[in-house]
Amino acid sequence: MIAESLPIRVEPMTTSCLDGVGLSEGWKAKLYLKFIEENNKTVLKERSHQGPLQVQKAFYPEVSGACHVYILHPPGGVVGGDSFDVKIEVDPNAKVLVTTPAAGKFYRSAGDEAYQQQTITVADHGVLEWFPSENIFFPGANVKLKTRVDLSKESHFISWDILCLGRPAIGETFSRGQLTQKLEIFQNGRLIRLDRLVVMENDAILDAKWGLGGKPIVGSFFCLTPRKDLVNLLRQNIGSPENGDLFSVTFVDDIILCRYLGNSVEHAKRHFIKAWQLLRLALRDHEAVIPRIWNT
């Protein structure tokens, strides 16, 4: 595997968590990444960050010249008052896989809201595979997440999102707190997908059959493609859910949508990785290359 070191431009932080000044305001972190294609290789051409969001190296494990990058958040957790703003731009013909090395953790808030915004733009014939690790929401967290994806008709975009409400491994549930998540996908300026999840204090949605049915892991997988026939490929080759988990594959507005609802992050990832492997080969004629960080 080849890793390419990159120059960093660091912008001044708006608050200081080193000397105690502005602790009540939380971290104000930003990350901007721009990828271009040069000589049949994708290059991270522009990068800037403010606060504890970073990308240290670009990796090239694929013969296609696709670039793999890992977004790092050294503090490891998010508390009330923290604000994160991630912007990713993929130019024509650039091929990028972005992931994170560990789960995001949103801790109990004393009242302030933690806010995370992600803005993604993929140009004609650009490729973005956006696979962040799961987000874990501790009881008492107050969180708002917003993702906007702007695509063209010829963009290639595959993404997943995995939410863990509480820590089921120790019997902990999301018994208090508030979570708002919004995803918007635009194609040539037209909204083609809007997903919104709102979980309030003691919300009936957590246990109701019409809601989450008491299952703490919620996963969504999106692939932009006009090929409806690939739905059957996924249905025939992805294993059946385990231990009462639910998994579905649908096709709406040129988007293949997989949903997972269950009790295991590992099961959700296994289903989604299999879907990605099948779609990668069918749509791009390249086998998926698992990021090394997923095996550590």
Image (spheres, grey):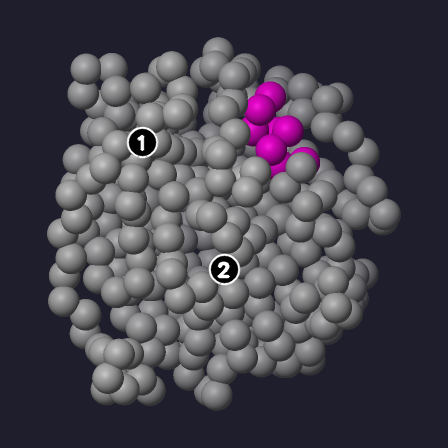
Q: Position of residue 115 (x, y in %)?
A: 39, 69
Q: Position of residue 291 (x, y in %)?
A: 48, 33
Q: Is residue 276 magenta?
A: yes
Q: Is residue 198 visible?
A: no
Identify the residue position indicated by label 1 in the image. 3
Q: Are marks 2 and 1 in contact (CB under 8 Å)?
A: no
Please tell me whether residue 85 is drawn above or below residue 188 in the rendered image: below
Identify the residue position indicated by label 2 in the image. 104
Q: Position of residue 79 (x, y in %)?
A: 44, 76
**Apparent side of residue 280 relative to residue 89 in the rendered image (left or right):** right
Q: Amino acid at mark 2?
A: Gly
Please tell me whether residue 48 is drawn above or below residue 79 in the rendered image: above
Residue at x-position 57% and y-position 63%: 136
**Number of marks:** 2
Q: Indicate the quadrant containing the C terminus: top left, top right, bottom left or bottom right.
A: top right
Q: Is residue 98 magenta?
A: no
**Apparent side of residue 86 relative to residue 45 in the rendered image (left or right):** right
Residue at x-position 59% and y-position 45%: 220
Secondary element at image label 1: strand
State which tag comes first along the sequence, 2 or 1.
1
**Which segment did they paint magenta?**
271-278
Please name the predominant secondary structure of the magenta segment in the image.
helix
Camera-nearest residue between 42 and 124: 42
What whole-number distance in Å separates the C-alpha atoms at marks 2 and 1? 24 Å
Q: Residues within 10 Å of mark 2 (few under 14, many from 20)?
A: some
